[in-house]
Image: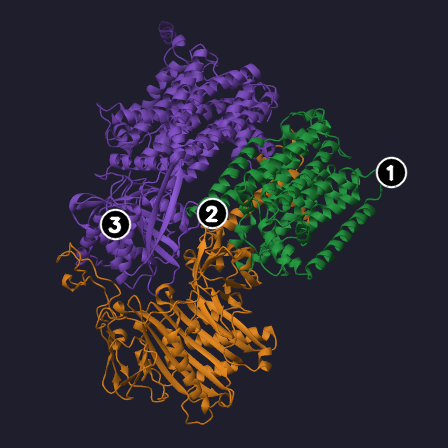
Chain colours: A green, B purple, C orange
Amino acid sequence: MDGGKVTLGRTAGLYAGAAVLRLALFTLFPGLPELLTGRVEISTPVTSFKRLQEGLFLYNHNVSPYDGGVYHQAPLFLPLFSLLPSFASWPIFTYLLYIAVDLLGAAALGKIADSGEAGSSALFQSPRREKRWSGFVIAAVFLFNPFTIATCIGRSTSVFTTCAILHAIAKAVSGAPFSAMVALSFGAYLSMYPLLLLPPLLLLCYDRQRPERAMPSGLRFAATNVCVVVSVLGVLFPMSYLITGSWEFLPATYGVQLTLSDLTPNIGLWWYFFIEMFDSFRSFFLAVFWLHLSCYVGGLTIRIRRQPLVVLTLLLGIFAIFKPYPSISDSSLFLALVPLYRHVFPLMRYTFVIAAIIIYTTFLGPAFYHLWIYAGSGNANFFYAITLVWGLGQSLLVCDLTFAVLRDEWEVERPEMVGKEIRQI
Amino acid sequence: MASSINPLSWLTASRARARALPLFTRAAVAGIVVFWIVGVQKALWDVRAWGALVPDEVGLTSLYRLNTFPFIHLNFFHAVMNILALTPLLERFETEYGTLTALALFFGPFATLPAFIYLFIEKFLLRGNTAVMGASIWVFLLLGIEAMKAYRANPSFKVGPYSIPTWTSPIGILLAMAALVPSSSFLGHLSGLVVGYLCGLGVLKFLAPPEKALRFVEGKLNLMGRLPHYISVDQKKYGRFGVLPSSSSPASAGISMGRGYSSLPAAAWELDGRWPMADGKQTCLTSDQTRLGPLNSGLLRLRRDPRILKVPPYLSLLCILVGVIWLFLLPLDDYSRRTYISENALLPGQVHTYFGGSDQNVFRAYKHETSALAGKTNIEINDGLETIIKGLGLKVSRQNFTYRSAGREYSGENLYAILQAPRGDATEAIVLVGAWENVKGEVNRNGIPLVLTLARYFKRWSLWSKDIIFLVTPDSITGPQAWVDAYHDAHDSARVSSLPLKSGALQGAIAIDYPQEERFESVHVVYDGVNGQLPNLDLINSVVSIAGGQMGMGVSIQEMWQHDDRYPDRLRTMLRGMLKQGLGLASGPHSSFIPYHVDAVTLQPYGVGWQDEMAMGRVIEGTFRSLNNLLEHLHQSFFFYLLMQRERFVSIGTYLPSAMLIAANFTIMAIFLWHQSQIGPPPNTPAVERQLFLPLGLVSLLQSLSVIPLSLFHHAPESALPPLFALFALINLALPPALSALLTARYRPSAQQYHLLQSFSLLLLGMFLSSLATLNFSLALLVGLLACPLSFVRPSRTAAGRVTCYLLLSAVAPTAVAVWVWGLGGWGRR
Amino acid sequence: MRQLLSFLLLLFVSLCRASSSPSSPDAPDYHEQLVLRPLPLSSLLASFNFRTNITLSAFEAHNFRYFPRSLAQILQHAGTRELHLRFSLGRWDAESWGARPWDGAREGGTGVELWAWLEADTDQEADQKWRTLTNALSGLFCASLNFIDGTRTTRPVTSFQPEGNLPNSKLANTHLLYGVLPHEVVCTENLTPFLKLLPCKGKAGIATLLDGHKLFDASWQSMAIDVRPVCPADGECVLQMEQTIDMVLDIERSKRPRDNPIPRPPPGHELKCDTSKSYHSDDTCFPAEYNADQDWSISQIFGRTMKGTCPLADPSVPSVCLQIPDSRSVYTSDGTTENKNPDKLSRCFDITPSSDFELWLPLPSSPSAPEVVTPDTPLLYAERSFTGHGQERGGMQTILRNPSPTSPVEFIYMESLPWFMRIYLHTIQARIEGNASVPSSSLIHEVYYRPAVDRARATQLEVRMRIPPRSTVFLTYDFEKSILRYTEYPPDANRGFDVAAAVITILGEGRKRYALRTTSLLCSLPTPDFSMPYNVIIFTSTAIALAFGGMFNILVRRFVAADEGPEMTLTTVKGRLAGLAARLRGGRA
């Protein structure tokens, strides 16, 4: 488990293994992809592959896919997937695409890990930074995480967002602000919420920019990069307009996330809340939920200014809980970044409880969903309760990680406090 | 602060002191538990009546009450509360004064004195006659002693300007108890407290047996050697009424302990991850608390006490016990409920049924027809029936099916007819199933003619709001399965042909299983579905109320042909039901419907009585009229229940705890072991990093290995199953020793890794069981009970211990149990 | 086809009469007719037909003679060019009853169905007029037509064609709107206003036979109102309103006396037994064939006799016709003359206007003689059902069978589905059985699809297909059941939601069209727990508060060692409170 010598061969073997495993699952169990695509835990209205197919079908038959209640995904998917050979006849190409996206994400993750940014950022050197896992291990944890595999087999389009975010971070760490911003804006274009990652990512880029072409003034740096994002989006949206021929896609893709008009169950906290919400308060609580989701950005960015990567990780964890349409792919992204903080694991206190909660909910969720939808012997509250516990478990993990990181920072000031009992006042 | 006692000191002291509960404390707790368990039943021997301290009852002959009453409790919670409160205090007392002294005092004066005081006040002053029981009297007595002790240590604590003497704190608690806890005897507690104060002041020194005598007894009997956990008079740490040493010990130990505990209570109440904050509160609290009287400090100590580590095993044992006992409580009137109809639309038995009269002639004719068909091939039978049904003017259709399961092939042809609801649209339907052969293979001699006659009769009515489907299947298991699969297009069309004729959503199904020739006495309702799923309770209730209430025939369930509505029979019914549910086999034509959320039951007439086929027909007519009234799909009543008599049941809320407790015991042990693995064997070692890799890998590997038997048993032909099973039973026997040998030889895991190994396995086990309990309660309970020993095994040093442990475990392993049952069954058959 | 021909003949005759001299005021522009057709399985089809004509000029000039004023005003107000309203109950058993009356042109799916051509310049205006129309009609017919809102309205492209001949100039800016209420239960309160529209108000003529008890006890019944402009080659355009009631009565059930409707088992000696059985005895009786009793009389079937004829009706059109082989004898009340049609399969009766009319059909004289006119097979059999189970997703399967051995059948299959059934069009496929020569891909010719918009618009699907002879086609597609807000569920949420019947329009040669409708379906959606909105709001908010509070605490508090920092004793608390108070005071000062 220690980050020993990572030869090129081992890495190649790892990727090959992951690819082969996925390909085997795709081909040997033909029923499996359809099954997973149908699971609410994996595909949400904004990432479902079946809805993507429907959108493609309409798009190829000259019906506007956004003039309807089914397709809520970014317009660029349509030409992308219609370039591929049709899924019905040649599914293998789609499979390969998804596998490739997963591997790209893993590669980016490996870069992030090997940069050591997690342990020692520009402004902060953790005393424990020696104890860390190599990019190989972390990529392996990501690639062989059951959640990641399930997402890939379920062909949820959120893998593209995941890949974009990971690349944005990787580029930022390797001191390429421009490409980082481009990657981020792609993520934001695909599913909106990555835009909230902009502030910490800016800081990360700023800290890690190359000395030869460093931009001393933070303000100018921020301004230029924001301009980059705006301009990229400014290119993407007109392109989508040209593809679909109307601006209908804006309300259909982003409006749905903002107003939660599609109440299909998922593992998040929103759906049941807004099913049971009184109509007069609906818009108010929508605003509150979005405000709550975005309010973490400022606080974390300021408080943990010295480690922007931590902020990014924590934000991703928070999004995985409080997004309008979360799925296990968001959790898998968060869980992929957590191992970067191997050095603060000893400072975490509820690892066992968290693991227990997550495992429990992973198994109880499908069982209760079955009781509600198919057996008809349970009602919606069964599944809702599990989503609640799932959310709590994840938030516990986020809080615990935050605590560990902060304590790690604090012990730099107070070295004598290592291993002592402390409290916060 | 400085003057007060540093709590940590007490910690270290206590840790240095007792590692285990001393003898008498154990005895007392055990006694309380035993008495409670005995007290569960009132029929044989009403302990409470026997042992409670009832002023009027106490005479010379019944003086024993003065000693017994502390052991007897009102109910479960009373007992548990008192045990929790008593144990630490009593333990302290005993470790200070020695076991013998405690024994002498608590069986002598400490029980009788308060009793006398209470009797005096209650009987002669108040002229009341309130019975008291429970160990709380001892709790307050010990509190009194503690309070006096603390009073000597530091006389008073300050709240703002005022200083309050510490000895008063128990009184506060007494008042609080009297105010908050209902039916807590203020007088009883008060008398206990008074004695406690007296004793604490040393007034009652004379009661304590002289040390010489004690030493003599000990020496003579060599109690030290004989009894475990015995605390000798010499072992006593402090002199009588000695105060605690106020020397503060290095904080680190306490902190490490504190860290040690973090994960357990944290799980309980600090979700927002502010453990150090809370911990800080605790520390400062304790520092106040020690000033603020001993009790709260006692409670706090309980939390930061090493003995907390001793609790979980007992706790999980308690979980198991309570789980089992809970199960056996269910048939009692207080725990089970009478059934009731919660779907108002059903209105069972509210309509007059007209089936009969000349329909009997028709029935006889149809019976001639069908008995002429008996013994013919499936196809010929269906031909015969089809002509009859066509003659009734119904739409008839057939379905071929072939199943290949366990190497055997089941094939046949279903015949079904649809009576289209006049004026209705094909949106909903009810099914009437008559299998040509029932589960036992008997020909459904009266059932099929009855189905035909009813079809003819129903056709005349114009009030049906739902289509009625008459289904005749060659057998009772595969036929209905094939039909209902095809109806919901969940079938493999290569094996099972699709249905050419369809109707709307199925709202319910009734199956007739009526092979017996002579007139019957009662109806047997079979309701177990596949995989332990059950139909909506409303359906069973309406059948019961129609057959039992309206038609006045007997109704029975779970093959309880005789059922006096008393505890043993209820228990037997419930256990039979649970066993059936746990095995999850199909028990009749109705079973295949239930997984599709179609509520169904099978009705079997049995016994010899005066009810004829027409009565049976009227039962079905009434049930169909009820189902016909339905506006919504049955959803009101319960889907999770245990019936213990045709009109008594327990719902999930009442019975689930027993399974959940069993599952919880594993989780508790898992957390406990995880935590054990952190603080190594010596108590003071600070937190160590765990080596997770080996345990995680091993556990996940073993868990994933279980796929192999699953797939094998699925695909093996029937003939190969017994040898396969034997093979896996052997593997089950052989694998553990081999694995452990390999493990020790190869990796020589540390104690910590063993702990983790067990912890993870138990965690997974608990999780699987609790998820299973929501799907199939009985199965989860059975497996959980069999797996109970797993949470108590520990790596043992001696070879003998290992062997015995291994033998025990493999004897109660599910496979072994299956072998036992099978063997016993075979033996019983012989 | 034969009695269809006779139908058309009658229609044509009456049309000619109606339009020969439409302008002359005394010309009869109202006539009514009842056609009785015995069907197999002891059923009887009774189709009532009332037709009123009014010249467009008179219509514009508001001088309605027989044309119901109430309806006319609504039509004028809503700018309706052509109106079709259907109230239907039960299902037509095509297997045994054969082709549908009027080629299915006068029937609707279960519930209420309404489609109309409205004159409007823009879609908005059309919608607005549509709303006016539905509201007015729901008032007129005591039906909840006003619930036909945007989510239940579609604009079919190919399925419906105007029956009347609208001048093309008008056709340009007329909009076809189609709405359906499958859950509506048709009952007597809809019949009464229907009769009120008749000139004789059900007091005389065949309308006197229309009795709610009998009508709504029928196995299948459909009330239709069609208003269309008819422009003959010569002469002035007339606005023609046709009211039709078709019902299939179960003879045995209808013959049951009103005062004793309960089908008690008859006394043993009254049972019709098959005496040929060996075991036949007085206590054992194998019942004789079910559909052997085509003997009935009007008063038995309808519970009353017919009260003469309507004096306003055109006397030259026979008001009662019976379609039965000539071999069978029919007895009628005296004063009526029976004249048989040349096709030997139907006869009509001239009735004395004043006296009551009774008709009795006895059992056939010889068992060998044909009992009923064998109904001719329909062009297409259609059966629709759901596949799959569970409340998450499902599939729709329509089995379409072309019985004809020679000719293929081309038709348009139209579904208008509620928005909460999210259909996946890419899963639509047609699988053919019985005729291997035709590839399945060539079955579907055209697809018109308008996807639903949540809470705003219904799905509209029109598929043009062609089925080769003697083959069966399975048309399937998947859909997803969406979960609604708890306020959007009906009170009986667990019953499920009715899905309207699919309309199948068979394209005959020329403009000829045959229509048929499948049965409607019941789609059960996942339901939340309606009892606990407050609990859900509270629980979720608590979870969020826990997460936020924990995060917030960790972020804002500063670390100290456990034994450092101020103790939280009561005194310190007091001190802090005091300090806070002081600060507040300072702030105020």
Q: In the image shown, does C233 or B448 lie closer to the viewer?
A: C233
Work out whether disc 3 and disc 1 sit on a shared chain. Answer: no
Would residue A156 be found to the left or right of residue B768 on screen? right
| Real-space Cα separation, disc 3 to disc 2, in angstroms | 43 Å
- Mark 3 chain: B
Q: In the image shown, does A369 or A125 lie closer to the viewer?
A: A369
Label ID, residue C454: none
- The reply to whether residue B292 is in sight is no
Amino acid type shown at disc 1: Glu
> Is residue C535 depicted above or below B571 in this figure?
below
Label ID, residue A381: 2
The number of discs equals 3
The quadrant where residue B314 appears: top left
> Is residue B814 depicted above or below A27 in this figure?
above
* SS class, disc 1: loop
Would residue B238 be found to the left or right of residue C244 on screen? right
Amino acid type shown at disc 2: Asn
Which residue was labeled with disc 1?
A: A212
Dots 3, 1 in contact, CB < 8 A: no
